[in-house]
Image: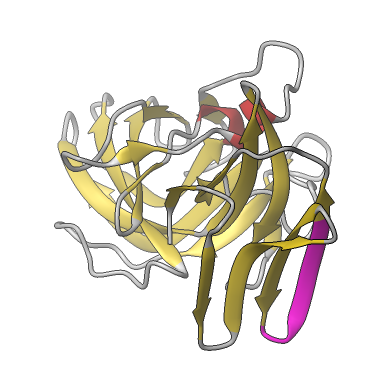
Amino acid sequence: MYGTYDFSFHDERKDFSIGIEHENGRYIYRRTLHGRTQERTLITAGGRIIINPVEPLNLPKDVAGHLLVEFAPLAIEPGGQETIYLTFPIEVGVFIAAKGNYEVVDIFSWNRQKYTLYGSPERGDLARWWESRVSFSPPDVDPRLEGTLSVSITNTTKEWVNVSRLVLEGYGMKIYYGDSASMRAWMRIISTQVAETGCYDAPMTEGQHKSLELYTARSIPGIERSRYLMDQGI
């Protein structure tokens, strides 16, 4: 389903349909998922529709700027390095491209959203919560529900460190897609309780396409952080 299409696009499968129809001289975007329909009238002479995975921080509302992935604890030796594979939740963005500009028309997901607080109530950050299994090779995923998240972990300390969660800054996420979605991230352990994280701007496999970044498309002003300091536990 991901890709760029003209306004004749239509896709339909079990409990889901999406497309654009021409009615009374206007284009109507419609998407139905589990019996609920989202509709929007497009006043345009034509353009393209772009469908790709976006930062999973938008539903049901823009309430968090971070993603927290929780997984079974890993013990990493002093100076150790390892690449693990996690999953992350999928949200799908639908964009209209016309005259060099992009407009977000719709965001939807097959997942239910859960949120949590990373850190204390006084100085913590609200984050989208996701529980993942840990793999040491790319896992099989249901592309409607989850993408693959590779994490290169480096323990810079002289101690054994236990790691059971990863927090990523939303503005730093770089999602790529083919048949499914993926991200590449890194984690640099600074102490037994502190780590810095970020994302690489590179595909996991050759031939993947870079997703249109939702925050860029919305033209949110200001310089945002691309890295995150996990200073309240790892």
Q: Which is more toward the observer, 23 or 202?
A: 23
Position of 45 with respect to 201 (left or right) is: right
Q: Position of residue 160 (x, y in %)?
A: 25, 41
Q: Which is more toward the observer, 98 or 25?
A: 25
Residue 35 within the segment the image draws in magenta: yes
Q: Which is more toward the observer, 45 or 16?
A: 45
Q: Is residue 161 in view?
A: yes
- Vertical placement of residue 7 versus 188, above or below: below
Q: Position of residue 137 (x, y in %)?
A: 14, 57
Position of 163 with respect to 22 (left or right) is: left
Residue 112 within the segment the image draws in magenta: no
Quadrant in the rendering for residue 83: top left
- Vertical placement of residue 174 versus 100, above or below: below
- Outermost residue, front side: 25
Q: Position of residue 68 (x, y in %)?
A: 55, 50
The residue lying at 35 percent from left, 60 percent from top is 73
The residue lying at 28 percent from left, 62 percent from top is 134
Q: Position of residue 47 (x, y in %)?
A: 61, 38
The colour scheme used to paint the residues is secondary structure
The residue lying at 83 percent from left, 54 percent from top is 41
- Vertical placement of residue 190 versus 118, above or below: above
- Vertical placement of residue 217 versus 89, above or below: above
Position of 66 with respect to 162 (left or right) is: right
Position of 111 with respect to 103 (left or right) is: left
Question: What secondary structure is the magenta-colored segment mainly?
Answer: strand
Q: Is residue 126 in view?
A: no
Tell me the quarter of the image containing the N terminus.
bottom left
Find the magenta span and give its range: 34-40
Count the marks: how many? Answer: 0
The residue lying at 77 percent from left, 80 percent from top is 36
